[in-house]
Structures are given as structure tokens and as C-alpha cells.
Amino acid sequence: QVTQQDVRKENPLQFKFRAKFFPEDVSEELIQEITQRLFFLQVKEAILNDEIYCPPETAVLLASYAVQSKYGDHSKEIHKLGYLANDRLLPQRVLEQHKLTKEQWEEQIQNWHEEHRGMLREDSMMEYLKIAQDLEMYGVNYFEIKNKKGTELWLGVDALGLNIYEHDDKLTPKIGFPWSEIRNISFNDKKFVIKPIDKKAPDFVFYAPRLRINKRILALCMGNHELYMRRRKPDTIEVQQMKAQAREEKHQKQLERAQLENEKKKREIAEKEKERIEREKEELMERLRQIEEQTMKAQK
């Protein structure tokens, strides 16, 4: 039973959907719109919680794509000052790092939001993910480990391989082991061994605090390695069909969007034409009134 496991005892119990494995290339591998949305929400939350480090200027750009995905095109009539007041858009670290007012942050984000005019909501989510996937901590699962000397380190497991980081720096790997260069991974109790393909290269040995951690590390390694190998093979027929269907759906949405834009422009032209006729009518009435006045004065 779930309640007998090591989880917070809430009533009702709350569960969060989380992707275990991350794609190498979001635009290629996240085919269905629902998958893209779930990934977007997960990555956005990780960035806002500072689980993925994001520089301030990138955070503002990402926030603008998140705003486009929520509100659509920026409109001066609809999106008045303060329209982002209730949205959580930037990591707390960024807000504290730069002493700008809420209004100044909103202005920065709004400037970018205006640049995304015409972008579909799902496309703005994809643009968000394409930028986020280049952040150093994106898609990395970190584990606290120690080397033979007892030095505290981080092990990072991601889509491309294993990385070892110093304890005070999760951004720059000290040593990297791409999946293509690893011959074998194994553990015995708390001891974990990475064997490189190059037999002349020494094995990398580290120690995890608990056996359960080593089991998790190995499961993540196996899953990521399997996906790494699968990506380097031709797509299965099923995946090809999914991609074709996704392309067709996207094309259909673009046609619908273009049709809506066309109708909107026609309405705007019709409104302007109506306003022009009304204006000319008023001018004509005014001229007639003036002529009448002049005629009456002349008769007197």
C-alpha cells in the first residue's frame, strides 16, 4: 500500500507526475502536444524552484515564452499594467540578485512578450524547452557520493552519460563519461564502479551513502543508456506514424490560425471602412448645416 511507504501522510494523498528520463533534443523527441506541455510544466517548475540554475537574462526570456503560452499575443487593450502581477515567472534568486521593482520586471518580460506576436501557444512552450535544454543542470539527476579518499562529490546522470562534479559546483563537470565510452557499470553494497571501454583507462570507483541510492543510480543509468542507443537507430514505424500525425495536426492548426487572422483583418478593414463612412457622413452633415446657416443669413 502507498500509505505504508515513506511518503508524506496527507489526506487526500497528493501525487506529482514527473518525467524520469529527459530527451536529448526536445523538438525531435517530444512528439505529442500533451507530452510537450507536461515537460514544459515540469521544467518551468524546476527553473522557478532553482533546481535548474538559470542566468537572469535567460530567465526573463523564458518567462516571456511562458507568458505567450498562457496569454497568447500581447494586446495593449487587454494586457494593462499589472497583468502579470499574479504570475510566478522568475526564480527568487533572480529577483533578489537584481533590485528591480515588480513593475520593472514586468516591463522587461512584456518587451519580450510583444516580440512573440503570432507565435502559437504550443510553439512558445517548445521555444521555452529548446532554450532550457541548453542550461547546464537541465535533465541531470544529482547524487551525493564520495571517492576513495572520502572527498564529497556529486554524480550527475543524464541523457548523454555520467558526470562527476565537485561538491560546491553542480554546473561544471570535473570528469565526464559519455555512454559511448562506458563498458560496464556495477555496484556491490555501497561501492559503485564505472569501467571505461578503454581498458588502459582506470576504473572510476565511488561510494554512495546507502545501497538504495546505488540501485536508483543503476536503474537511471540503464534507462538512459537504453534510450541513448535507441535514438541512434532509425525510428520505428509507430514513431514515424506519431510524427506524421503530429505534423498534420500542427499544419491543420496553422491553417486554422491563418484563417482566423484573415477573418480578423477583414473585420478590422470593415470596421475602419464603417468608421470612414460615418466620419464622411458627419462632415457632409456639418457642411450642409453651415450652408443652411449661410443661406439663412443671406436671406436676412
Image (cartoon, helix red, strand yellow):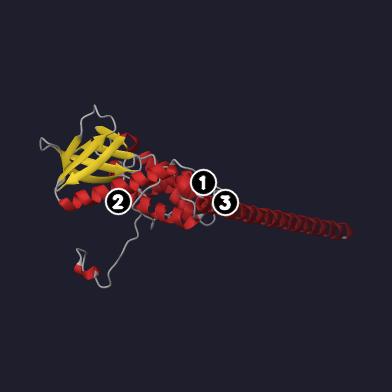
Secondary structure under tag 2 reads: loop
Who's the residue at 40% across and 53% down the image?
39
Give the residue type at disc 3.
Ala
Judge from the rendering whether residue 225 lies leftward or rightward of residue 131; answer left or right. left
* Label drawn at residue 244: 3
Q: Is residue 258 visible?
A: yes
For disc 3, the neighbor class at 10 Å (few under 14, some 14 to 19, many from 20) is few
Q: Residue 39 carries which label?
A: none
User: Residue drawn at (28%, 29%), measured in percent from left and top?
Assistant: 198
* Rendered-image quadrant of the C terminus: bottom right
Asked if residue 129 is positioned above or below residue 253 in the image, the reply reads above
Separation (CA) of disc 3 from disc 1: 32 Å
Identify the mark nearer the N-term, 3 or 1.
1
Q: Which of marks 2 and 3 is in front?
A: 3
- At 22% across and 44% down in the image, what residue appears? 186
Secondary element at tag 3: helix
Distance from disc 1 to disc 2, alpha carbons, whole Å, reads 26 Å
Q: Identify the residue under disc 2.
A: 49
User: How far apart in space, not on screen, are marks 2 and 3 (Cα)?
Assistant: 36 Å
* Residue to which mark 1 is pinned: 114
Mark 1 residue type: Glu
Instruction: Tell me the quadrant of the picture where the N terminus can be found.
Output: bottom left
Q: Circles 3 and 1: CB distance less than 8 Å?
A: no
What amino acid does circle 2 point to?
Answer: Asn
Q: Percent from the top left, x then y, of residue 57? A: 38, 39
| Viewer-side residue, 228 vs 247 | 228
Residue 83 is at least partly visible in this image? no
